[in-house]
Each structure stands twice: as C-alpha cells, then as structure tokens.
Image: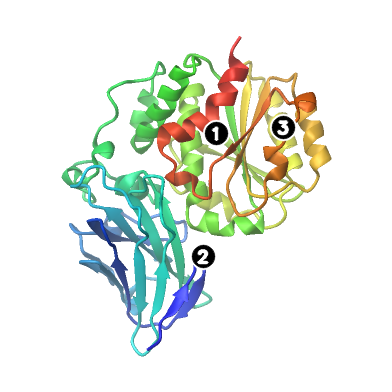
Amino acid sequence: MQATSLRKGENATLSVAPVVLAVIVRGLSADVSALLLGPDGKVRSDNDLVFYNHPAQDGVSVAGGEVSVDLARLPAEVDRVVAVVSADPLHPGAVFTRAPQLKISQPAASPLMFTAPDFTAGETVVVLAEVYRRGGGWKVRAVGQGYASGLAGLATDYGVDIEPDGPAVCAARLPAQTQSAPAARPAVDLSKVERQAPALLAPALQAGQVLVGRGIAHRQAAVYLILDHDWHMQELYESFAVQAFAERVLALSANLDDDGTVPVIFSSGKDPFLEEIRLDNYRGRIGQLHTQVDWGWGDVAEAMRRAVNHYQESGAADPAFIVIQVGDEPQDKAEVRSLLQNTASLGVFWLFVGFGRGKLAFYKSLNASASARFTNVAFYDASRNPGAVPGERFYAGLVDAFAAWMQP
C-alpha cells in the first residue's frame, strides 16, 4: 500500500490494533526504546522505560529497531507511549547528523512515514513519535525532537530513576557524559543539586563554569522564568522542548540563588499564571502546570508586570534576572518598551530568549539603535530546538549580557 508521509508535528488516527514503529538510522549505531507515560507526562515507575535490558512492559515491546505497541493491552492509566532513538553509548562522541526515519504500520492500513529534520547541534537522542489517547481512540504524532543530553537525561525528564544500581538503565550503557560530572567545579556549592536533582548536576556545572569564565561566579540573583503560552507553542510543550528549557534555567538558577526555586509565569491573557519549578519537583513540572492555562495570545507585558511585582514584594536585595521565552512578536510593543524603560532603575535584567515559529524582529532589534539602547535588556536566539544546543554554548547565550550588566 502507498505510504502516507507525516511532517513534524502532524498526527494521524490509529485503529485499536497493534502498531509497529520501525526506526531506520543510517551512518550511526543506535538503540531504540519506549516510555509509557501517564496523564502527567511521567512514567508510573522505572519499569515504564522499555529498552534493551527491559524489552517488554504492559503491551509495549522493543526488539532491534522496532517498538511494538498493542493498544488493546495498554492499561487505562497509560496515556501515551513515546518512541525514542539514542546514539549507542558504547561509541563515545557519536551524535545524530542524518535524520532517523520512522515507519508506522498497522494491519490492513496504509503505512505512515516520518523523516525527522537533520540535526546539527550534537544531538545524541531523538524523540521520534508518540502514540496517545484522544477522544476514546488513539492517534500518533510525529515529534522529531532532538536532545544533546543523552538517554539518561531524557529519561529523567519523564521521571525515570537512573541511579547506577536502579532497575532502569545500567551505568555501563549510559553515555560517558552522564556517568560522571566534569572534574572542574564552579565556585558555588551544588550539593543541594546533587541531593535533590542529580540529573541536573551536569547542566548546573556547565552553567557554573560559564559564570566563572564571565567573572560573576560569586554574584547572586533572583531568577524568574516567563513562558510563552500562545497557541502556536503547543507543539513545543507537547514535545517537551519547553520542559527541557525550563530545566536548564533551573540549573542556572542553582548557581545564582541557593533556594532551588524559580518562579514560572505563563504568558496567556490578562491574568498570567504564576507557579514555581523547584529542584525537588521539576520532573514533568511544566507539563503539569501548562495544562492549567488556556491557549491564547499571550500578554507579555502583563506577565512582565507580574514578575516585577513578585520581585518587589519578595523584598529581595539581589538583582532579578528575568528570562522570558518568546515565540512571536508582542501584541503591544509600546507597552513592552515602556516597561523596559521603567524597570531600568529597579535592579531588573530582562533576557528575551527566542524559540518557536513566530517572528521575533521586535526583540532582536531592541538594542539595534545606539540612541535608544536598553542597558538592562538582551536577546538570545536559542534556535528552533534549544534542547539541542550544547550546554556551555547555551549558557553563554543566557548569561553573557547579564554578566556584563552585573560587572561593577
């Protein structure tokens, strides 16, 4: 039968019959695995990671380059199954360059084909697709999201315990960068990260090294995170790109503020939703929170005001470093400019981080004019896939302008 091609983000309806997701990787030795997730986007237990050392669980099995899902056998509490391909950790330095392909087959149905975009930023693991419940039936979505953190880093995003003696992933098969932290340590004590969020230790160390290199390793700041919740961001939330971004900001915060907490504000309408992400609750946290927020045209200016009010009410003596993820132009550009001008004397630094599908010309040009520069504002283009940007390069993009602002 003629195969139907899916583009990244597209979905298709499945019948309630076994489905096979066959992965084709060229030029690279790779492993295929699957995760069984509940409605909260996390595994029920470590056994929900199905891979070479645990090849079957509740109707999902992995054999060679194929993930087989018997939809009729999946427990009711399993909301979706995610298919993952990762570079073989026994080949250090191996990364994806050519895109993996995926063939999705069911009995008596035309097959579906998906080719992920090519990768260029050192990706070692790719979420290819997810099979998920929808309206009493099942669908499959082409994801194609790459990460540079390896299978272990991805697994922790979904709540899998990757301790070396745990049941999920044995240390001998993990990529070298996930087995031990770099020898060099930043000036900040990260023992809290080691205790509460060991999977974030590597990015926290990377962030710390960048802060050391910029000469602000001993400076403190209250870190805030504002996330775009416009409808066009839906794919990036569902593919966990926003979760991965928030985790990296949390790892940076661990170096600047020892409370292990980042206030998170979702920019959506006139009543921005404020919560927090912490070292002890970060796994799947963004997925849990954003489902409480309606999709819509986000009001960036209102979210910015909410952050400033929270900062002032907290009575913090340290400056505020407010990271704002933006995916499109703001509705009221004059209002945003006014807020930036009015907060210049409040000890607030604004970093707009662009990723998404929208136009970002407004943010890119904020400091383009020498006669109208904002000393407390910067823009960083994190590309369409910020999770794939290598750690030190990512953190340099986050802190370079902030470090220059912090210098006496």
Q: Position of residue 374 (x, y in %)?
A: 73, 26
Separation (CA) of disc 3 from disc 2: 34 Å
Q: Residue at x 70, y 25 (%)?
A: 313
Visible in this render: residue 71?
Answer: no
Mark 1 crowdedness (10 Å alpha carbons): few <14, some 14-19, many ≥20: many
- Tag 3: amino acid: Ala
- Tag 1: amino acid: Val
Q: Nearer the viewer, residue 26 or 275?
A: 26
> Which residue is disc 2 drawn over?
9
Q: Secondary structure at mark 2?
A: loop
Q: Which mark is residue 217?
A: none
Q: Nearer the viewer, residue 199 or 357?
A: 357
Quadrant of the image containing the N terminus:
bottom left
Q: Nearer the viewer, mark 3 or mark 2?
A: 3
Q: Position of residue 78 (x, y in %)?
A: 39, 66
Separation (CA) of disc 3 from disc 1: 30 Å
Q: Nearer the viewer, mark 1 or mark 2?
A: 2
Visible in this render: residue 253?
Answer: yes
Toward which corner of the image does residue 3 lie, by quadrant?
bottom left
Toward which corner of the image does residue 127 lie, by quadrant?
bottom left
Q: Residue at x 44, y 18 (%)?
A: 212
> Which residue is disc 3 drawn over?
368
Q: Residue at x 28, y 39 (%)?
A: 178
Label located before the other in sequence (3 or 1): 1
Q: Secondary structure at mark 1?
A: strand
> Which residue is disc 1 drawn over?
262
Vertically, is 89 above or below 136?
Answer: above
